[in-house]
Image (tube, grey):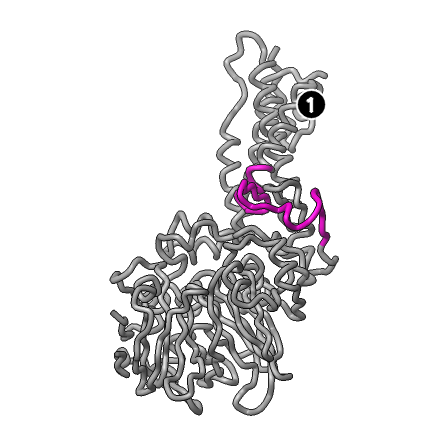
Amino acid sequence: MVRVQPEDRGPSLRAIRWTFAARRAWVVAAALLIGYGTLYLLVAKALVIDPAAGFERFGPLPSVTFAPLTARALTSWIDPAFVAYLSDSVVLAPSVPVILTVLVLGALVGVNGAVAVEATIRRPAGCAVGGDTRWIVAVLPSFLASFSCCAPTVLLLLGAGAAGAVISVIPFVVPAAALLLLGSLMWSARRLERTTDLAV
Amino acid sequence: MAAAACAPGVELPSRGAAPVAPASELDEISDRITSGGPSPDGIPPVEKPVYTSIAEASKQWKDDAIVDGFTIDGRPRAYVRFITVWHEIVNETAGGKPIAITYCPLTGSTLVFSGELADGRTTSFGTSGMLYNSNLVMYDRVTKSLWPQLFGVAVRGERKGERLREIGGAVTTTLGRWKAKFPSGVVLSKDTGQARAYGTWPYGDYDSGGTPLFPVRYGDDRFQAKKLVVGVREGGAALAIPKDEFAQRREARIEVGRRELVAQYDAELDAVRVLDRKTLEPVSAYNVMWFAWYAFNPKTEVLR
C-alpha cells in the first residue's frame, strides 16, 4: 500500500517509530552504535589494544582513574575523563567530547542504519523503493572527528602538506558529521513516509 | 671538525647576551610558527613532579623503556618517555631554581633549560600548542614569550631575541641501562595529578621512519629523516654526530664554534656525551631526529 502525504513537510518521527516497532531495528541500531563507537575510539586512540603493553605491571586490573572534574576536562578533546586499564593489553581513555561524539554520532549512525534495514526488509511487495544506503556517506566525515584528539593518524597518512588544512577544519567536523547524519535521517524518513504505510 | 659558518640569513643563537639573531630572522621564524592542534597547555606540563625509587619503577616499566636521564642536585633522575610523551615539559627545581626538562615527540629531542631569564626573573614553562619546524614551541609563564625548543631563543613576545640557558648532561637511554649505572636513582612517577593512558604511545610508529608531520624550513636527504643524531651547538656553529656510527668510534676530539670539546660514547648507557675538553663539564648535546636538526641548522657539519 502506498500513501502520499504532500502536506507533511516537517521532519517526521513516524518513520522512526515504525522502524523501531521491530525488535530487529533495535539490534541493528545497537550493533551499529557499538561498532561505530569502537572504531571511532580506536581511530581516536582513546581505545588502545596493544598485546605487548604489559599494563599488569601497574597493579591489579581492571583499574580506573578518574580525572579531576574541571571546566577544561569537560571541553578538552585531549584530556581523558577517565583512564581504565581493562586488561594487560587494553586501555580505554576517552575525553568527555569523545564520549559525547561517540554517543551522538553513534546513535545517529545506528538510527540511519536501522531505518535503511527496515525499509529494505519491510517494503511493500512489488514496490521497488527500498532502503537507501547513501547515509553511509555521511558516516565518513564523522570519523574525521576522531582527529580532534590530536591523534596524528590522519596526518601520517596525508603528510605534512595536508596537516595545516586538516587541523583547520577539525572544529567543524563533528557538527558537520552530525548535520549530515541528521539530514540523511530526515530525508530517509520523509521518503519512507511517502512510500510506505507506516501504521504501527 | 665543525666550522662556525651559518646559512645565509640564518644566524644561530650563540652563547652570551641577547640579541642572538637578527630581528628579521626572528620575525621570519615567528611567522612560520603553525598550530599543532592543541590549545596552550592542552598538552599539560608536569608541574609538581613526584619521583619513585628505581626499584619501584622497574616493576612498572620494562627495561627497554626509553628514558631521559639527568642528574639534579646530585641525584640521578630518569624520565620515562611513556610518561613525558603526554606532557612534553616537566617543571622542576635544581638548587632551588627552576629548570624545565622538555621533550618533543615530533623531533625526538630532550633539552633541559634554566628557568632564569636574563633580567633575573624566574619562570616555569608551558606548551603553546604551536610548532616550528615540527618542533615544540614553549612559552614562559612570566612573559608568555614563545621559545622553539630546538632554537632556544624567544622569537615572539617580551623576551624576543633572548636565549635560554641550556643545561648539559642529559642523556637518552633505556631504563635498564640507567638502572644498572645508577641503582640509587629515582624515576618520575606516573602519579602526575593528571589522568593519561601512560604506557601507550600516541604517535604510533612515527619514530621509525617516514616524513615529518608538519612543514620544515630546510630539508636534507643525507640521512633518513628520523635518524637520530646527537646535536651540538656552540658559538654559532653546529655539529651532528650520527649516534649509531659513533658507537664504533667511541671518542673524538672536536671543535665547535671555537670551543674545544670531546665526544665520548658511553657504552653502559648506549649514549653520547660531549664534554668541554678543559673543564670536563658536560655541554648541551642531545639526541634529535636528523630532519629537525637540519631544519634548525642548515649549515651543520656532520662528524664522519
**Element marked by disc 1:** loop
Crowding at dot 1, Cα within 10 Å, few <14 / some 14-19 / many 20+, comes out as many
Between A155 and B244, the one lying in front of the other is: B244
Q: Read off the chain for label 1.
A: A
Is residue A114 found left or right of B63 in the rendered image? right
Residue B38 shows up from this direction: no
Res. B128 visible in picture: yes
What is the quadrant of residue A56 in the picture? top right
A97 left or right of B289 in image:
right
* Point 52% across, 42% down: residue: A143
Residue that label 1 marks: A20
In the rendered structure, does residue A60 fall within the stretch colored magenta?
yes
Q: In which quarter of the image is residue A165?
A: bottom left
| Image x and y of residue B190, in percent | 64, 59
Position of the N terminus of chain B, as image quadrant, is: bottom left
- The residue that appears at 47% across and 80% down in the rendered structure is B166
